[in-house]
Image (cartoon, rainbow, N blue to C red):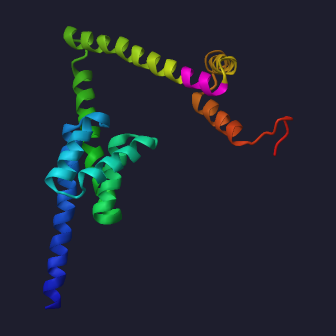
Amino acid sequence: MVNESKGSRNSSGIKIHADIFAAFFRVGMLGFGGGPSAIPLFQQEVVKKYKWMSEDDFGDTLALANTMPGPLATKMAGYIGYRVNGLAGCVLALVATVIPTVLLMIIFLGVLQQYKDLDWVSGMSDAVVPVVGVMLAILTLDFLKKSGDSLGWFRAVIYVAISVVLMEVLNVHPAILILAILIIVLIPFNRLGGTK
């Protein structure tokens, strides 16, 4: 009798692992790139197909995931996997979500590299550059606007100018600059200029 219950627990554990892997593998394959495009896929798998969450729970999880830094797809997969089956479910959901995207990127870039000399492939690659440039410009303007609102426009422009000089003229690596800014932000200063 004890052996039968152990066997049924093992088979139900294998079933839940297989379900988690299948659900998040489909999201990883079909939601290529993650982000907002993957949300309906998560909802289909988690709420409608497997019923691991209610619509309200899913909405709360999505709202919380949007407030935290990092890729949305991995945050959602990690939390839902953890909720369904603890740490093993979390790891399995993350692997199943990330691996398809990584493999598809490797295959896609390999194909592009193989056929890069064809006119239509080089044209396609050249067409991506202005799109990426516009996206980066929009992100930069949004960041500058937020910085201007929180720091004041004069300080924000000065900080941007200093950053440009450090990176472009003095060749300071951006990671070093970001680390220095984090250290400066985390050190508390009082109004007289000394440390607290």
Q: Kindly identify the residue that appears in the image at 63 percent across and 19 percent down.
A: 160
* Nearest the eye: 188 or 22: 188
* Nearest the eye: 193 or 150: 150
Q: Kindly identify the residue that appears in the image at 16 percent across and 84 percent down.
A: 5
Quadrant assignment, res 193: top right
Q: Judge from the rendering whether residue 120 lies leftward or rightward of residue 62; answer left or right.
A: left
Question: Is residue 109 at all visible to an observer of this figure?
Answer: yes
Q: Position of residue 156 (x, y in %)?
A: 65, 21
Magenta span: helix, strand or loop, mainly? helix
Quadrant assignment, res 10: bottom left
Question: Is residue 33 at all visible to an observer of this figure?
Answer: no
Please count the marks in the image. Answer: 0
Q: Judge from the rendering whether residue 20 lies leftward or rightward of residue 144; answer left or right.
A: left
In this rendering, the answer to whether 189 lies above or below 162 is below
Q: Position of residue 125 (x, y in %)?
A: 29, 15
In this rendering, the answer to whether 118 lies above or below 166 is above
In which quadrant will I find the N terminus? bottom left
Q: Position of residue 46 (x, y in %)?
A: 21, 52
In this rendering, the answer to whether 67 lies above or below 129 is below
Report the residue that reaches farthest toward the front. Answer: 56
Quadrant assignment, res 37: top left
* Nearest the eye: 21 or 172: 21
Q: Kindly identify the residue that appears in the image at 20 percent across and 40 percent down.
A: 29
Q: Which residues are magenta?
A: 144-151
Asked whether 148 falls inside the magenta stretch, the response is yes
Q: Kindly identify the residue that appears in the image at 64 percent across and 38 percent down.
A: 182
Asked whether 11 falls inside the magenta stretch, the response is no
Q: Judge from the rendering whether residue 136 lies leftward or rightward of residue 35; answer left or right.
A: right
Q: Position of residue 168 (x, y in %)?
A: 61, 16
Q: Judge from the rendering whether residue 130 lies leftward or rightward of residue 182; answer left or right.
A: left
* Nearest the eye: 45 or 90: 45
